[in-house]
Image (tube, rainbow, N blue to C red):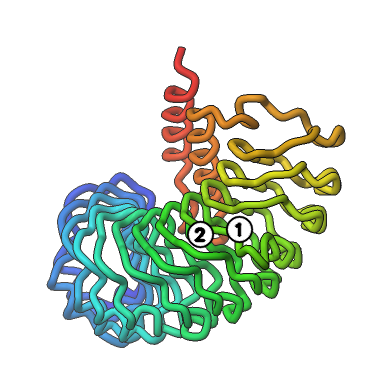
Amino acid sequence: MRLKYLNLSSNAIQGEIPTNLSYCSDIQFINFSYNNLVGKIPEELSSLSLNKLKGFYVSINGLTGSIPHWLGNVSSLLDLRMQRNYFQGSIPSELGRLQNLRFFQISENNLSGEVPPSIYNISSLLLLSLVTNRFYGKIPQDIGFTLPNLLGLYVRENQFTGHLPVSLSNASGLRGMDFGFCNFTGTMPTNLGSLKGLEKFSVAVNQLETDEVEGFSFLTSLTNCSHLQVLELGYNKFKGALPASLSNFSTSLQWLGVGDNQISGSIPEGVKNLIGLTSLAIFMNSITGEIPEELPSVDENITMGNGEIKECLVAVLTIGVSCSMESPVERMDMRDVVAELSRIRTKTFPR
């Protein structure tokens, strides 16, 4: 067959991926995303032309099994999206051969193990999303040099350890980074202010600390990110008073989360200048003084950190970030948004 483009996404297709696709020797794009497919990715597809297939999309289905090793032989592959399935096992090291790959999205599966070093050497990558799996190990300290073209780096909800790489600032095009819900330790890099296009940055729910000398200098650096919309630092071990430089964030900032840390002192008066701010989460700290009059009134439960409210805030933030991803393929499906919001409402505000 001369079929080059096959797009069956966003339907209600059931069953397994047909093995006879292997006869489509000229096919360049296969898109089965947003369906109800089950079973494994057929081994027969390994016979597809190794220099023509550019896009392989099977996101948001019920697929099982492991990520096929033979995908590493498809040298023409630019886009590999496999998120929100039930894939198990580890990432095949063979995928590191895909030196033209731009988008690698395997979030929300049952994958585990260490990420092969070869993945961090695919210098063409624009997006690396490993969210909600069971990966462990450390993020290479030189990742900003080996993946200099990254626009998005998302490793949230895994078991990664170690320090956040200082070299991230070298990937100057980064727009989104999410290191939340892992086991990162140490202090924050103080050079992230050079990421002028950064829009979303989260390190929530880790074991990060402030340096005794540098303090919150990393916050001062981040004020140079004039496009920053979401900054989530909650549930760590940051200590000390918030710097006056907080007022230097641009009016693009909408969400600032520093809840459940060891922050003391008062809310900087200049925060009133952040006219774009819609959410300020400062619960479970040792904040003193008064809330600046210019700020919207803050719900007492949120300020004091009621447990269910905290969980609700984090869950809603996660949905918000998922819905505002740069790439439409990454965005959370609206059907899932409604279902998740309904679950949160029922749990947080039971009748």
> Is there any visible trace of residue 52 in the rendered image?
no
What is the spatial separation of the Cα atoms under label 1 and label 2, in whole angstroms?
Answer: 8 Å
Residue at image point 19% right, 56% down: 64
Q: Residue furthest front?
A: 212
- Say what secondary structure mark 1 lies in: strand
Quadrant of the rendered structure where residue 138 is? bottom left
The three-letter code of the residue at mark 2 reads: Asp
User: Which quarter of the image is occupied by the N terminus?
Assistant: bottom left
Coordinates of residue 238 in the picture (x, y in percent): 59, 53
Horizontal side of 190 relative to 147 (left or right) equals: right
> Where residue 284 is drawn, which disc sits there?
none
Residue at image point 32% right, 62% down: 82
Which mark sits nearer the N-terminus, 1 or 2? 2
- Say what secondary structure mark 2 lies in: strand
Q: Is residue 281 above or below residue 233?
A: above
How many dots with numbers? 2
Depth check, front residue: 221 or 15? 221
Q: Please name the residue that numbered disc 1 is placed on.
A: 200
Q: Are marks 1 and 2 in contact (CB under 8 Å)?
A: yes
Coordinates of residue 314 in the picture (x, y in percent): 51, 41
Q: Residue furthest top?
A: 351
Q: Please name the residue that numbered disc 2 is placed on.
A: 178
Q: Is residue 333 above or below residue 191?
A: above
Q: Is residue 58 above or below residue 294?
A: below
Coordinates of residue 207 in the picture (x, y in percent): 47, 55
Depth check, front residue: 26 or 203? 203
Residue at image point 58% right, 65% down: 188
Q: Alpha-carbon neighbours of circle 2 within 10 Å: few (<14), some, or many (≥20)?
A: many
The three-letter code of the residue at mark 1 reads: Lys
Coordinates of residue 123 in the picture (x, y in percent): 46, 85
